[in-house]
Amino acid sequence: MYNIILLGPPGVGKGTQGARLRDRYHIPLISMGDILREAVREGTPLGKEAKSYMDKGELVPDDVVVGIVGERLKGEDCSRGFILDGFPRTIAQAEALERLLEKEGKEITHVILLDVPEDEIIRRLSGRRLCKVCGAAYHLVFNPPKEEGRCDRCGGELYQRDDDNEETIKARLEVYHSQTTPLVEYYEKKGLLRRVDGVDTIEGIFERITRILEEGNNSPKNP
Ligand code: AP5
């Protein structure tokens, strides 16, 4: 069973690789950013609270995101594994996750840390476009859609995220360095962390990740 955390700064490719892992292993991709953005779009109380933090590139309070993940992990579809993208982002969130999983007799099996230099991250985020309907991620230069402004998967309209502007990208990177990087040591000490060079084609990076996941696994596509 794969219970995976995708770790790394904004724009490193967590969502892109997460979607490919979901399709390969048929396990749910739980993206905290997507969950929060959907709440913002729907104007729910959670969305209203989250928006003020997200617009500034700050983290939404731990108790809010831990509550969301706790509920989501109870889903029947998580019984055969899951991929967490964008959670945990603080030590408090990581500890809460451990307690949540412990109650269910589960544990994290892999923490994949994607590593990309900062100038490349800024290039990636400023050219990112997302599908309004299915959330698929594109890049104007590195991963363009076949038809301009339209999603290849579902034909939905593409848009640019509010927080993908230079000022907010810088704030998100600072928040990552101050609040999320301690998780690298945290998971390293637990022997779960695997570093993956995130500068390559999307396919090349995907191969690196699946090689790590499938080490010692004889039936990789049917875990
Ligand atoms: P979230 O949505 O999780 O944003 P993030 O962590 O900043 O990550 P991104 O989605 O920006 O990047 P990514 O690594 O997924 O990259 P992607 O694959 O899209 O969070 C948003 C906000 O929500 C946070 O700021 C916070 O406010 C809140 N939040 C979320 N989780 C929280 C938590 N746990 N606690 C508190 N608050 C939380 O790729 C980027 C671009 O690069 C794309 O255009 C893609 O096509 C392109 N690309 C990908 N791979 C490659 C490649 N190999 N080569 C070239 N281009 C590539």
Image (spheres, rainbow, N blue to C red):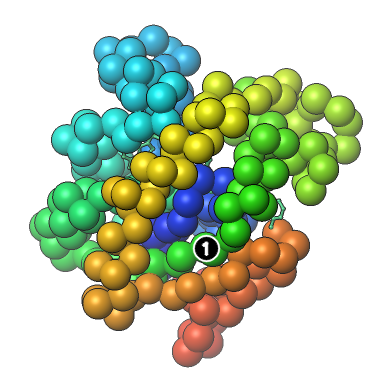
* Residue 23 in view: no
**Closer to us: 101 or 115:** 115
Residue located at (58% from left, 52% from top): 118
Residue 82, quarter of picture: bottom left
Picture quarter with the N terminus:
bottom left
218, above or below 170, in the image? below
Q: Position of residue 185 (x, y in %)?
A: 29, 70
Q: Position of residue 175 (x, y in %)?
A: 37, 42
Badge 1 residue CB within 8 Å of ligand 1? yes
Q: Position of residue 166 (x, y in %)?
A: 59, 31
* Left or right side of 135 for 201: right
Residue located at (16% from left, 56% from top): 95
* Residue 210 in view: yes
* Left or right side of 121 for 169: left
Mark 1 surroundings: few (<14), some (14-19) or many (≥20) residues within 10 A: many
Residue 146, quarter of picture: top right
**Closer to us: 45 or 55:** 55
205, above or below 179, in the image? below
* Left or right side of 75 for 83: right
Q: Which residue is labeled 1 in the image?
A: 114
**Closer to us: 83 or 55:** 55
**Closer to us: 101 or 92:** 92
